[in-house]
Each structure stands twice: as C-alpha cells, then as structure tokens.
Image (tube, rainbow, N blue to C red):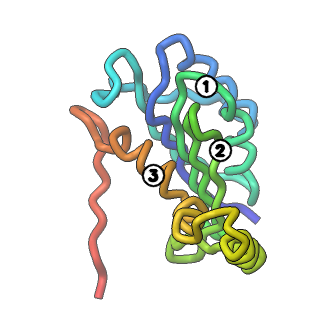
Amino acid sequence: MTTRGVLYVHAATSALCPHIEWAVAGALGVRVKLDWSPQPASPGTYRAEFSWQGAAGTGAKLASALRGWLHLRFEVTEEPSAGCEGARYSYTPSLGVFHAVTGVHGDIMIPEDRIKTAVLKASTGEVDLEEEMRRLLGAPWDEELEPFRYAGDGAPVRWLHQVV
C-alpha cells in the first residue's frame, strides 16, 4: 500500500540542513533536496516543507530518522491508506516525539487503553485528567510549534476551502 504525507521542518540550524536531507533520503530511498527558507520565528534557523509518497509506515521512518536532534523542530503527517490509519508525528527538543493515530478527516484518535489508563491514573491522583487528555491530544507540542507553523515571508501558504 502506498500513501503520502508531508514533512514540515519548522526550524533547523543551517549546519543541520544537509544532514536532514541525507536522513530523509535514507528513509525514502531517493535523493532529496529541500527548498529552505529563513524561519522568522527563530532568526538564524530555516524551514522547509516536503511532500512525500511511500509505503504505509514511511512517516514513522522519517520521524525516527530525525528524532533526538538538538536545534530541530519538525512534524510529519501520513495520510490514511487502505487498511492503515493515518499518523502525525511532532518533535521538539524539549518535549521529544509525539505520535498520534489520525482518522480519515485528520482527527487524532486516542486508543481506548490510553484513555482508560489516564482515567485510572487520575482516580488515584497520579495525574490531572484534563492535563493528561491535553497531553494525549498533543497540546504541549502544538503550543510549542505554533509560532513556527506561521508561513513567513516567501514561504508556501496552502489555502484550504470548505466544501459543502
């Protein structure tokens, strides 16, 4: 099964840019050249977007190839395909990797066992249920990445139109 997705490099130092291209090429098995532009939210860093197509699970390969690097913030999306849910991966140096299963409309799908565990931990006072649900939905990653998601000068902007 093939699927497609997008790699969003939100911020990377110039020294990391060629290493990111090599890591992405290794995960995809093809040569990759990203179109880098300055990241206005973090002067001295660069951003890039890359649409990819590959086998189901390619998003996980990309996230694994890039995780753990200091001075790098990224997201990877993978669209659902026949027999496979979609996925979203977000990474920041301070929070690490967030992974979520996504449905056909892009909604985050939290598995039942993770919700049950959150409720159990909350009932014993180990966690605050609302805060744990926010974490399961990736809110801390969204909050940290939001300033970097803004399309700066010269960056591609994708307009989405509602169809009724």
What's the residue at 65%, 73% (across, down)? 110
What's the residue at 59%, 75% (across, down)? 103
Residue 83 visible = no
Extreme residue in the left direction:
153
Checking the image for residue 20, the label placed there is 1
Callout 3: 10 Å neighbours few (<14), some, many (20+)?
some
| Mark 3 / mark 2, whichever is N-terminal | 2
- Viewer-closest of 122 and 29: 122
Q: Which residue is mark 3?
A: 142
The amino acid beneath tag 3 is Asp
Task: Confirm or deny contact between disc 3 and disc 2 (CB under 8 A).
Answer: no
Q: Which residue is mark 2?
A: 97
Q: Is residue 152 above or below residue 137?
A: above
* SS at circle 1: helix
User: Left or right of 145: which side holds 122?
Assistant: right
Picture coordinates of residue 30, whole percent (x, y) = 70, 34
- Viewer-closest of 27 and 77: 77
- For the residues carrying marks 1 and 3, which lies nearer the camera in this image? 3
| Mark 1 / mark 3, whichever is N-terminal | 1
The amino acid beneath tag 1 is Ile
Picture coordinates of residue 52, whole percent (x, y) = 59, 47
User: Left or right of 38: which side holds 96?
Assistant: right
User: Left or right of 28: which side holds 8?
Assistant: left
The amino acid beneath tag 2 is Val
What's the residue at 30%, 43% (across, down)? 150
